[in-house]
Amino acid sequence: MKKLFLPLLIGIASLFACSQKKEEKKTAITQPAPSRNRPVQADAYVVKARPISEDIQVAGSLAPAEGTDIRPEISGRVVSINFREGSFVKKGTLLVKLFDEDLQAQLKKLEVQLAINEKTVERYNELIKIQGISQQEVDLSQLQVNNNKADIQLVKVNISKTEIRAPYDGRIGLRNVSLGAYVSPTDIIATIRQVNQLKLEFTVPEKYSNAFKPGKQITFSIDGADKKFQATVLATEYFIDANTRSLTVKGIVKSNDPALVPGAFAKVDLDLDKNDNAIIIPTQAVIPLSRGKQVIVYKKGVPDFVTVTTGIRDSAYVQVLSGVSLGDTVLTSGLMAVKPNSQVQLSNIK
């Protein structure tokens, strides 16, 4: 009984499988295949002329026109401090005085010796007239006078080194020494900065380095101020930084606004190039290639891949120097789906 039931079960299963395959084949034949000629939906832009400028913004910083660390030329003990921290000082103002009593004593000694030697020269000049002395003795006494004068001048120079004065008009910073301290040429007494004139320092990419010549006008802004400030390019570094591929530029700030303080962060607006009647297209319409650039021009429903040469650009548009003309329609979306033999249907034209 079991031997008859097993072949019957296998036959029924085979019959069911064949029926299912025929049904799937029939369904596959009757279901229509997707159309390969369905048009690609894309947005487009009509090429026109309008003004365009290439503007970038770089970071910069304000710095004093001059900044100097005040150091003593010689070692010595501080006997007086004649400035107030954070105050303005004039050029030549005595800031710090070092101990110089030993030098003053040397000066007085030399001045006495000079007076004696000058009297000796006067007497010898009278004696030479009556031939009471040789010319050699007169010359030696005059030589001694000249030596005394040279020694006095040397001591005076050393005394002047004990007087530390302001090199220019500026604001003095915090002092780092106290009265009675012993200082040496390696010690910084204070820092002075010329804050009535500021400099603007920033860097620009290498490809824009030729655009910055002395005298070029630039605009910048700072945080906390709603207005723009002007500066004039003073000089540029003579080399391109190999690590950042950028050029350092220094400018002189024109205004003396209280909002401008040394060390402030500045946003520098650079107007690098401008064309008042440029042929432009949206930047997203340009397809970058390994060797050049292309755009897709729409002509009666058919795409035409055209090689173009671009110029200056801003945040949204790029100038086209060759490849397209005024009135051409270029695709701005669906670029990856468009092939040379594709059908294109425009959904939005600007």
Image: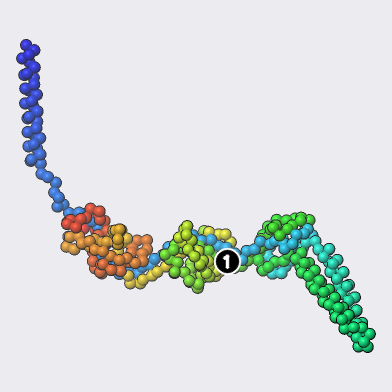
Q: Quadrant of residue 79?
A: bottom right
Instruction: Give percent across and percent down for residue 272.
Output: 42, 67
**Of 225 and 34, the residue lying toward us:** 34
Q: Image quadrant for the N terminus?
A: top left
Residue 312 seen anywhere in this rendered image of the structure: yes
Question: Would residue 226 be visible to someone looking at this image?
Answer: no
In this rendering, the answer to whether 222 lies above or below 213 is above
Q: Position of residue 180 (x, y in %)?
A: 78, 56
Where is residue 181 drawn, in percent x and y?
Answer: 76, 55
* Residue in view at x 25 percent, y 69 percent: 325
Q: Is residue 260 left or right of residue 108?
A: left
Q: Is residue 64 left or right of residue 338?
A: right
Instruction: Please tell me which residue lies in front, 165 or 26.
Output: 165
Q: Is residue 15 above or below residue 240?
A: above
Residue at 27% in and 58% down: 332
Give, as a three-letter code, the residue at label 1: Leu
Q: In terms of depth relative to the viewer, which is nearer, 191 or 132?
A: 132
Which quadrant is the C terminus positioned in?
Answer: bottom left
Which residue is situated farthest in the bottom direction here?
130
Query: Disc 1 on helix, strand or loop?
Result: strand
Q: At x 23% / y 66%, what residue is drawn?
A: 328
Name the residue located 90 percent from the left edge and 75 percent from the top edge: 116
Assess disc 1: are there few (<14), some (14-19) or many (≥20) residues with their C-alpha within 10 Å of its C-alpha: many
Q: Is residue 186 above or below residue 169?
A: above
User: What is the total number of numbered labels drawn onto the structure image?
Assistant: 1
* Location of mark 1 (residue): 198
Q: Residue 199 is drawn in which quadrant?
A: bottom right
Residue 171 image-quadrant placement: bottom right
